[in-house]
Image (cartoon, rainbow, N blue to C red):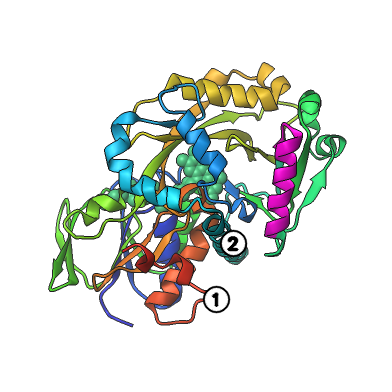
Amino acid sequence: MKEDPIIIIGGGLQGLATANALLDRGEKVLLLERNSGVALETSFANAGMLTPSQAQPWNSVSDIISILSGIGKKDSSMLIKLREFPSLFFWGMGFLLNSSKSRYLSNTDNICRLAQHSLELTRKAREEYKLHYDHSSLGTMKIFRDELSFIKGKKEAERLNDHGITFTCLEVKDVVQVEPLLDDISDQISGGIIFPEDEVGDAYKFCTELEKIIRQKGGRIHVNTEVKKILFHKGKVNSIVTDRVEIKASRVILASGSWSNKLLSNTRLNLPVRPVKGYSLTLDISTLSDKPKMAIVDEGIHTAVTPLGYLLRVAGTAELAGFSEEIHQKRIDYLNRTLENIYPSICSNLDLEEGSLWYGFRPMSIDGMPYIGLTKIEGLFLNTGHGHLGWTLAMGSADLLADIMTGKDPKISAKPYLTSRAL
Ligand SMILES: Cc1cc2nc3c(=O)[nH]c(=O)nc-3n(C[C@H](O)[C@H](O)[C@H](O)COP(=O)(O)OP(=O)(O)OC[C@H]3O[C@@H](n4cnc5c(N)ncnc54)[C@H](O)[C@@H]3O)c2cc1C
């Protein structure tokens, strides 16, 4: 063990999980977060699903067609801004290359393996530290609007079953039995698939719980601290410059999500991660007499509706629009419509305008897998690029990185996720 602390840049799911994993291996950590608290960016109000069952990356041919058909349209669930084309060109090429059947399938398998490892560690942490984050272990249910997508969904589930993902296909009447509030739309669905081992939980609450544990273990977390630059000397990390001070450092982990690239601008490293903006709307359903129990994924439109304690969250949509802070009313209408299409009777008893709207920037890699491990620069490590599955993959990714950094054998092979495949 070295004496100086490992500096972790970013206090979202990845930074916090990494800090915790390193402390468990006897390392000292200093986590720096530019915001006034942890997990106020992409880890704040995501869909809350821990789903090895959704290990498929987003570069399937059907997703790509959906993205392309959204160009220029504001009312699609996916959108790409023409002005972003230059910055997306090489990333987009890599994204397309990874849509070949063989790569798509092997990337799915790798994500699934890491997701399962991660979920196991999330459960373990919950029990060990008695974490409260409105979790539910009821599983998740995918619903299908037509026979063809139901057949496709069953095939995908069967493939994941080879990795031990269990599932049950449900006829419409069984879907309604599992979630009686879906009775309103029973004539519009072809069936469902339930994944009993998936979990659900509030990622923000998990992060704040983890923050407490990290501090109790002696880890330091400095909020309101923006890292402006990482300085290098002779191919090695030398120090980091924050908005207040320069700190000597020999080991730095970039866990800055979609912003990780900015801190590499003084290097030759070109990290293929781009922000994919998504929205969520969270409603207080405490006054409803009948509340949904089960997290639902409406397949095909990447939209999820998740009960989290007394809240109901609908999340989804994907915009390749850089870090645009613009809120598109059409995207909000889309989420409202989605909720109405799943739970019409609930919506008639709620004022959707009172919901809390949020957006975050998924750090999307070209192959759907995170970048974990050492870069070509000595002392500079990454844990980023978790895209649409950063909650599902957080504890497992941190575990791999901590093992790599401390010279231990990772519990699953780290090879597919290593940073060296890109940098
Ligand atoms: C709508 C939506 C729904 C989603 N649903 C799910 C889901 O159901 N399940 C799932 O598994 N995943 C989901 N995700 C994905 C998941 O939320 C992300 O993958 C995850 O939050 C990324 O975590 P992170 O720590 O990498 O990034 P972030 O949470 O964005 O954290 C990065 C942190 O780094 C900080 N930072 C950046 N630059 C600096 C700097 N220079 N100095 C100091 N600090 C800095 C930022 O302030 C930020 O706090 C969803 C995402 C979205 C947008």
* Image coords of residue 84 (percent x, y): 31, 35
- Tell me the number on the disc at residue 386: none
Residue designated by label 1: 411
The quarter holding residue 183 reads top right
Q: How many marks?
A: 2
Q: Residue at x 18, y 60 (%)?
A: 267
- Of 165 and 392, nearer the camera is 165
Which stretch is magenta?
Answer: 143-160
- Of 392 and 167, nearer the camera is 167
Residue designated by label 2: 109
**Secondary-structure class at tag 2:** helix
Magenta segment main secondary structure: helix
Residue type, mark 2 in image = Asp
Residue type, mark 1 in image = Lys
Categorize mark 2 by other alpha carbons within 10 Å: few (<14), some (14-19), many (20+): many
Whether residue 71 is visible here, answered yes or no, is: yes
* Image coords of residue 339 (percent x, y): 63, 26
Q: Residue at x 29, y 31 (%)?
A: 83
Q: Residue at x 62, y 56 (%)?
A: 52
- Of 411 and 83, nearer the camera is 83
* Image coords of residue 103 (percent x, y): 52, 58
